[in-house]
Amino acid sequence: MRLRQRFETRAFTLIELLVSITIISILASLTVSGVGAAKKASRRIQCLNNLRQLGLAMNFYHQDSDGFFPLAYQAGWDNYITDLAPYLKTTTFNTGWGEQRLP
């Protein structure tokens, strides 16, 4: 008498597959939200640093110009940013609102 050999293959059931996909998607969403929060924090830190640099430049200008702050509006193309340019690390500026990109 010949015995049949039964080959049982172990495979994922539908429930196990759905549970594993759910766990992976939850972990992926947590990772994506963490990256978004890190980007937001880095933008905030960069903005605070820019404001700090402008404040320091304004203070140095105030010290060098006998207690006067730069004028907000001047005739021609000059404004307070061009007056503060020697006190800032950069000398290139945007020429208008159209070139600035908001987050």
Image (cartoon, rainbow, N blue to C red):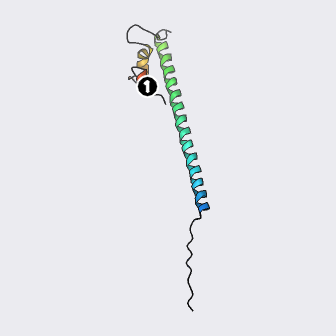
- Which of the 4 image quadrants contains residue 37? top right
Q: Residue furthest bottom?
A: 1
Q: Type of residue at label 1?
A: Gln
* Residue nearest the observer in this picture, 36 or 25: 25
Secondary structure of the residue carrying tag 1 is loop
The x, y position of residue 27, in whole percent, is: 58, 50
Residue 26 horizontal side relative to residue 61, left or right: right
Vertical comparison of 84 with 21: above or below: above
Q: Is residue 5 left or right of residue 92?
A: right
Give the residue drawn at x 55%, y 73%: 9
Residue projecting furthest to the top: 75
- The structure residue drawn at horizontal position 49% and vertical position 26%, both measured from the top left corner, is 50
For label 1, the residue is 100
Residue 12 vs 2, above or below: the answer is: above
Residue drawn at 40 percent across, 24 percent down: 99
- For this view, does 97 lie left or right of residue 51? left
Residue at 52% across, 35% down = 42
Q: Could you tell me residue 47's position as x and y percent?
A: 51, 28
The number of discs equals 1
Above or below 8: residue 39? above
Q: Quadrant of residue 8?
A: bottom right
Q: Nearer the viewer, residue 38 or 71?
A: 38
Badge 1: residue crowd in 10 Å (few <14, some 14–19, many ≥20): few
Is residue 22 found left or right of 96 in the rendered image?
right
**Extreme-front residue of the structure:** 1
Percent x, y of residue 40: 54, 35
Question: Which image quarter holds the N terminus?
Answer: bottom right
